[in-house]
Image (cartoon, grey):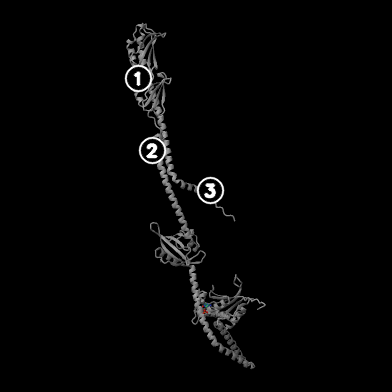
């Protein structure tokens, strides 16, 4: 037969594999959590930093726009001043006579910014010009702005209208970019940024760069159209730094990582210890279980109310119930014999009250198959890990075998004693037989002589002749019995011969006719026809049958109703090693045996009769067993007792040539 393939659930395999993996990888959890935390912190810091950078760029742009607006405003002021000068010049009809240096607007313009002023007519011919005499450097107070390149200049143009005879033309005011920067307030800017003005050709015009201070991060460039396509570049000194560059953050992350690693290592050690402890506990549990199961002693744990908490395999085998059927049950238990439930309940209460004898107590349980199990139970207190009394632990020893051996020994001892008594009896009988044999032989001899002397007599002597014949027959019979007793006394075995048991039953009933009639006992016969002969010592078997009939008749004496003895014979087939046999049964309608076993009935000197010896049945059983047969006794269902014996069918010894 092919081996059964275990039906594994794929889900359960996957689930148990996952559980194993989880147990193995559990120690990595703190490290993993630490790394996840670091990643989250990093993401948060990176996003923060991006926001800050964005805000910085916005601020830079705003600041650059503000500088541009400031410069524009400054130039607007200059344009207005130039317009004032143009208005003054518009009324002058002879430009050659004009001294520009004397005009207050021009002087003020040179003081502020201009470094040259040219008056052109409509045909762009120079009508007059003036130059600033002041050294340009002296004007500069640039709040840390260092000039790198001079010469970058711008021009302001203003038309000169022709008024009251004046000429139409235009005024051109030249100024240097660096001068314009010098008159602009940039101090607030230079503190935060490296401010650089770069010409359209890429030449640095002025810068606020300070030694030892490096700008951070990306610079923002803002074109300044009002400033001759110059570009303003602002590079912040204080840009947000990449989050991972911060030493504090690095220290924090390193610390966190170290903590995660340390926690993981600690957890791994703990998990290993727990796993080792679990494995040790599983091994111990398996050992304990196999020890409990292989023990010859049954074990049973109960709570304080008697509910079964645990049973081992031995106990289950003792009573024939499975552990799953017994655990959880409360008394009365299914293996208690029904007739003893009350007594066992009382005993159980006694035990639960703590009064069970320390030396154990004997009791009887009933196996599921009905067999009685004799056990001794030793009860001890069951305590939990804190020493609290939580129930009772019972150790149960099956003493059935011990009892059987004790019983055997007792019966053996009794049999020896009975044998000894029978031996004594045999000796007495042998003595008696020896003493009785002589006179009985004499009776037989005399009666034979008397018979012979009466033989030729008249018919009137017929009565005397019958009496003498009966005398002779009985004397011979007595002689036979005496001889048989003698043979037994001399330990001679039975002398079996082929014997028809039906004929033997007839013969014994005939002989016992008188006493049966006296006791008013009716006899019913049920003899099977065609019985095979049995091997029997006739005298011995006659004694057995006689004894059974007498006992039956005596038992029914005084009983109400008809005293009826039924005698039956039948053939028993050969079963196994038991040979075929013929059985004789003697049943009566007497009081019955009251449950007494054959052993009790056959016990020597066991009698319920006033004048009984209590030896008859014991001798009967010995005779039957000597023949290889067996004697039995039982109560009848309808009242009365039945005794019976069986004898093996006679097996003729094969005749050989030498025999
Ligand atoms: P005895 O006849 O001397 O008492 P037995 O050995 O023949 O000795 O019988 C032993 C006992 O068995 C009797 O005393 C009687 O109590 C019981 N007994 C034997 N035969 C019967 C029977 N047919 N019915 C009831 N009891 C019987």
Element assignment for label 1: helix
Q: Nearer the viewer, mark 1 or mark 3?
A: 1
Residue picked out by circle 1:
182
The residue located at (50%, 72%) in the rendering is 408
Residue picked out by circle 3:
10
In the rendered view, would you say 373 is above or below 603? above
Element assignment for label 2: helix
**How crowded is the residue under tag 3: few (<14 C-alpha within 10 Å), some, or many (20+)?**
few
Q: Position of residue 550 (x, y in %)?
A: 54, 80
Q: Nearer the viewer, residue 524 or 601?
A: 601
Place residue 507 in its image quadrant: bottom right
Residue 251 shows which numbered tag?
A: 2
Q: Quadrant location of the C terminus? A: bottom right
Q: Position of residue 156 (x, y in %)?
A: 39, 15
In the rendered view, would you say 233 is above or below 654? above
Element assignment for label 3: helix
Q: Quadrant location of the N terminus? A: bottom right
Place residue 209 in its image quadrant: top left
């Amino acid at each position: 037969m092919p081996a059964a393939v275990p039906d594994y659930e794929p889900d359960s395999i996957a689930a148990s594999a996952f559980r194993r993996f989880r147990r193995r990888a559990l120690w990595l959890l703190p490290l993993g959590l630490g790394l996840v935390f670091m990643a989250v912190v990093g993401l948060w810091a990176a996003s923060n930093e991006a926001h800050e950078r964005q805000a910085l760029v916005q601020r830079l742009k705003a600041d650059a726009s503000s500088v541009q607006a400031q410069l524009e405003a400054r130039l607007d002021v200059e344009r207005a001043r130039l317009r004032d000068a143009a208005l003054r010049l518009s009324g002058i009809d002879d430009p050659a006579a004009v001294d520009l240096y004397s005009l207050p607007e021009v002087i003020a313009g040179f003081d502020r910014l201009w470094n040259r002023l040219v008056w052109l007519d409509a045909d762009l011919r120079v009508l007059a010009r003036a130059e600033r005499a002041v050294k340009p450097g002296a004007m500069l107070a640039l709040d840390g702005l260092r000039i790198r390149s001079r010469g970058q200049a711008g021009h302001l143009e203003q038309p000169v209208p022709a008024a009251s005879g004046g000429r139409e033309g235009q005024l051109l005011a030249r100024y240097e970019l660096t001068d314009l920067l010098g008159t602009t307030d940039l101090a607030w800017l230079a503190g935060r940024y490296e401010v650089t003005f770069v010409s359209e050709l890429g030449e640095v015009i002025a810068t606020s760069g300070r030694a030892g201070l490096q700008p951070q991060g990306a610079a923002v460039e803002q074109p300044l159209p009002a400033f001759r396509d110059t570009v303003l570049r602002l590079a912040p000194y204080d840009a947000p730094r990449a989050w991972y560059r911060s030493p504090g953050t690095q220290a924090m992350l390193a610390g966190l990582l170290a903590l995660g690693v340390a926690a993981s290592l600690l957890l791994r050690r703990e998990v290993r210890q727990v796993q080792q402890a679990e494995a040790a506990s599983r091994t111990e549990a398996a050992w304990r279980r196999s020890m409990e199961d292989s023990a010859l002693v049954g074990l049973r744990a109960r709570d304080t109310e008697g509910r079964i908490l645990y049973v081992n395999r031995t106990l289950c085998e003792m009573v024939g119930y499975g552990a799953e059927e017994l655990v959880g049950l409360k008394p009365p238990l299914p293996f208690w014999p029904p007739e003893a439930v009350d007594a066992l309940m009382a005993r159980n209460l006694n035990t639960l009250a703590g009064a069970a004898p320390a030396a154990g107590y004997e009791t009887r349980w009933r196996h599921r198959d009905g067999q009685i199990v004799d056990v001794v139970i030793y009860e001890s207190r069951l305590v939990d890990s804190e020493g609290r009394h939580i129930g009772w632990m019972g150790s149960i020893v099956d003493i059935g075998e011990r009892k059987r051996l004790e019983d055997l020994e007792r019966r053996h001892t009794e049999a020896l004693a009975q044998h000894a008594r029978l031996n004594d009896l045999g000796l007495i009988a042998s003595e008696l037989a020896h003493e009785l044999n002589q006179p009985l032989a004499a009776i037989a001899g005399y009666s034979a002589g008397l018979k012979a002397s009466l033989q030729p007599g008249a018919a009137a002597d017929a009565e005397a002749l019958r009496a003498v014949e009966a005398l002779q027959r009985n004397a011979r019979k007595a002689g036979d019995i005496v001889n048989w007793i003698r043979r037994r006394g001399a330990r001679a075995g039975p002398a079996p011969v082929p014997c028809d048991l039906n004929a033997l039953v007839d013969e014994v009933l005939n002989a016992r006719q008188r006493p049966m009639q006296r006791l008013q006992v009716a006899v019913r016969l049920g003899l099977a026809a065609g019985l095979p002969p049995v091997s029997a010592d006739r005298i011995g078997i006659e004694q057995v049958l006689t004894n059974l009939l007498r006992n039956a008749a005596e038992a029914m004496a005084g009983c109400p109703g008809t005293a009826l003895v039924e005698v039956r014979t039948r053939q028993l087939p050969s079963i196994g090693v038991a040979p075929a046999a013929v059985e004789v049964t003697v049943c009566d309608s007497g009081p019955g045996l009251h449950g007494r076993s054959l052993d009790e009935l056959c016990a020597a000197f066991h009698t319920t009769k006033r004048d009984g010896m209590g030896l008859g049945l014991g001798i009967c059983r010995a005779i039957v067993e000597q023949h290889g047969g067996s004697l039995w006794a039982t109560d009848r269902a309808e009242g009365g007792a039945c005794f019976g014996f069986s004898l093996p069918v006679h097996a003729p010894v094969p005749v050989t040539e030498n025999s």
